Amino acid sequence: MAVKLRMTRIGRRHRPFFRINAVESRAPRDGRIIEKLGHYDPIEKDPDKQIVLNRERVEYWLGQGAIPSDTVSQILLRQGIKHKYAEQQTARRQRARTAARAKGRFFTKAEKIAAEKAIEEKAAAEKAKVEEKAKAAAEKAKVEEKAKAAEEKAKAEEKAKADAEKAKAEPAEEKPKAEPEPKEEPKEPQAEAPIEAKAEPEAKEQVVEETKAQTPEPTEEKPKAKAKPAKKAKAEAKKPQAKETEAKAKPEPETKKEAEAEKKAKDKTEPEAKEEQKPEKKKRPVRVKKTDKGDEN
């Protein structure tokens, strides 16, 4: 017959109280006991009164081969009573713990809860690090965006200033070109060189007018007109050449008055040249009527 050292519950509801007894292993929890060895009161605050044991009788039954339960074994170890069953139990638990860790499992619920808490804390720390990095990256991006915006704004302002300066400078350069130069005749008497410069175009105009006058105007051919003699045609052809040589030989007029006098003189000569160029009209012969009286005479 095997003997066990285990506890029996005594007391009312919500007021537990346990007795430590030596009991047959096949007996139920509240069955017949062999010997009373002490008691355990968990509500008692005084540690001396919380556990009460008969030390001699406990050692006797342990020597006889009695096997304590897990709870009774812990109570005995707390009271300083060592036994081989506690050592065997710790060895078994250690082997089971190492096997569970080798398989990647948790041996007790406490270890599982502690591991879960450690995992949660690690995940929270990693998440916090990631959030901090993201915040730092966002702040850095904001700072860079602000710097870029400031640079773009500064460039735009510089460009606008440069465009404004160019726009101001361009009209200032174009104004003297666009404004017409004032053409006001000076009140002071002009020098000799400008007078000669003005007289030259007038002399050229006179030469052009002379050449126009010398060219014969087209006239309608008259059927009854006779051709001029050869001597007169040669003389007329020589006249314009002589006039041209005279005009070239003459010096350029120095003043406006001399140019006007020459112009008037040439204007008088032009109608004469035109009259000379006109063909002479042939005089019709006068016809005499014959009468009867004349014939008779």
Image (tube, rainbow, N blue to C red):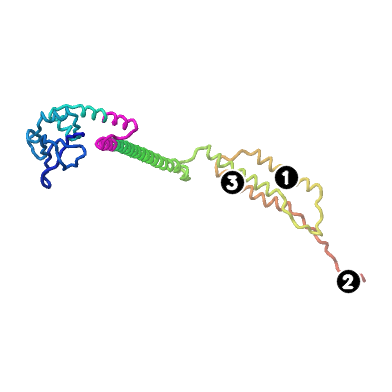
Which residue is at the front of the view, 230 or 145?
145
Q: Secondary structure at mark 1?
A: helix
Which amino acid, mark 1?
Lys
Q: Name the quarter where the C terminus is drawn.
A: bottom right
Res. 184 in view: no
Q: Main secondary structure of the magenta part?
A: helix
Q: Residue at x 7, y 35 (%)?
A: 49
Mark 1 vs mark 3: which is more N-terminal?
1
Q: Residue at x 15, y 38 (%)?
A: 7
Which amino acid, mark 2?
Thr
Furthest residue toward right = 296
Left or right relative to 48: residue 137: right
Give the residues drawn in magenta, as a range: 93-121
Residue that numbered label 2 is attached to: 291
Structural distance between the alpha carbons of marks 1 and 2 = 51 Å
Q: Secondary structure at mark 2?
A: loop
Q: Residues within 10 Å of mark 2 (few under 14, many from 20)?
A: few
